[in-house]
Image (cartoon, rainbow, N blue to C red):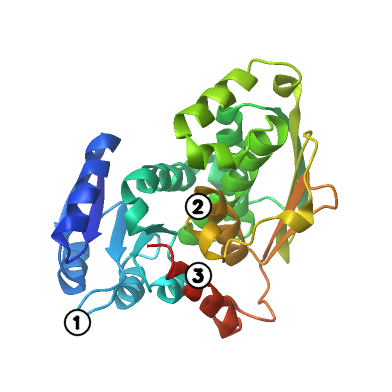
Amino acid sequence: MMLEILVVDDSEFDCAAVKKVVRALGNWHAEYVSSGAVALARMKEQQFDMLLTDLNMPRMSGLDLLRRAKKLNPAIPIVVMSAKGSAEAAIQALRLGATNYVIKKNMIHDLPGIVESIMRSSRSTRIESAILGHLEQTTFQFAIPSDRELVQGAVSYLQMIAEKFGKLPDAERTRLGICLEESLLNALIHGNLEVSSDLREGDSDAYEKLIALRLKQRPYRERMIEIQATFSPQQLVFAIRDEGPGFDVAAVPDPTTAENLCKPSGRGLMLMRIFMDSVEHNATGNQITLVKRLAPAVLALEEQPDDFAMSISSSWSRCD
C-alpha cells in the first residue's frame, strides 16, 4: 500500500532533496506543490497521509498553511522544514500542532527517520481502541528486554490506551508516541547499552554497529527497561527507567544552544519539552518521567514566555 505525502515548497533545490528521501523510503508517493493555496486545494480533493511544508513561503506562510490544513484534516501529521532564522516560527508551528520539524541542511539524513517515526506512531487497531474506550483509571507496569521491536510495541500499546482514556485527538496521540519512542530508545541505547550519542554524530555506521554488538553482549543484553504508565482523568504519567549506570543530570546538554540544537541527540529532549507538560530526570539519571495533563494547564504552550522561543531562535540562526 502506497502512502501519500504532500510536499509544499517553492524551492526546486529543496524539493529535489525531498525526492531523494521519498525514493529511499520505497512505499511513499509524493506530490509536490509550490504554494499553500494549491496545497489546500489538493487536500480538499484527496486524502494525504502526511504534509511536509516549508515555513518561509511567499503569499501564504507555512504557519498559515498549518492552521488551515489542521481545520481541513485535524489528524494529518505535519512536518515543517526550517532554514536559517526560522527557529521561532518552527517552535510556534510545534505549538500549533505540527508533529515534528527538520532542518533543511540535514534533510537527507534526518527526514527518513522522522517520517518512519510518525508513521509508527500513527498506527492503531480499531478493535483494541474500542475496548479501551471503557477503561477507567489504571496503572500499567512493564519490564521489557533491551529490544527495539519491543520498544516500538510498548509505544504503540501506550498510545492506544492514551488515545481512548485521555480522549486524545490523533495529532496529540502521534506527538505522545514520538516522545515515548525518544525516551524509550534513550533508555535502551544510551542507558542499557551505554552507547554515546557522540558516536552517532561522528560516525553513524559505527554507532549502529556498536548497538548491534552490545545487544549480543553481557551485561548489556541482560538489562531491562521498566515502564510505569499511570492514566487518570487529570493526566497521563510515564516513568521510564533503565538499568544502566546513569549520568550526571546537571550535565544534560541544553538543546536550545547552537551546538546542540543541530545535533540528532538534541531533537528528542527538545520535542519532549514542547509536547509534554513536564519532563523530569531522577537524581542518578537513569529514569525520566513524562507528564501530559488532560485538564486545562495553568500556562498553555502558546502562552509560554517569549524568551524560550527567542533563545532557540538565536541559537538556530547559527546552525547553517
* Residue drawn where x is 50% and y is 27% of the image: 206
Please give the name of the residue rendered at 36% of the width and 48% of the height, measured from the top-left corner. Answer: 111
Q: Is residue 154 left or right of residue 89?
A: right
Q: Amino acid at mark 3?
A: Ser
Secondary element under disc 2, as helix, strand or loop, is: loop
Residue 73 placement: quadrant? bottom left
* Location of residue 120 with respect to 62 vertically, above or below: above
Q: Nearer the viewer, residue 306 or 145?
A: 306
Indicate which disc, 2 or 3, sits on the residue closer to the N terminus.
2
Up-down relation of residue 310 to residue 27 (above or below) = below
Q: Amino acid at mark 2?
A: Lys
* Residue occupied by mark 1: 59
Is label 1 in a helix, a strand or a loop? loop
Between 60 and 162, the residue placed more toward the observer is 60
Which residue carries the number 2 mark? Answer: 263
Tell me if label 1 and label 2 are in contact, CB under 8 Å. Answer: no
Of callouts 1 and 2, the N-terminal one: 1
Q: Position of residue 309 (x, y in %)?
A: 53, 77
Going from the N terminus, do you reach mark 1 or mark 3 first?
1
In the picture of the structure, the residue carrying the numbered disc 3 is 315
In this image, 40 relative to 248: left or right?
A: left
Q: Amino acid at mark 1?
A: Arg
Observer-side mark, 1 or 3, equals 3
What is the C-alpha distance between the residues marked 1 and 3? 27 Å
Image quadrant in which the N terminus is located: top left
Residue 285, x across and y down, in percent: 79, 48
- Image position, residue 59 (x, y; %): 19, 82
Q: Residues within 10 Å of mark 3 (few under 14, many from 20)?
A: many
On screen, residue 79 versus residue 178, left or right, reads left
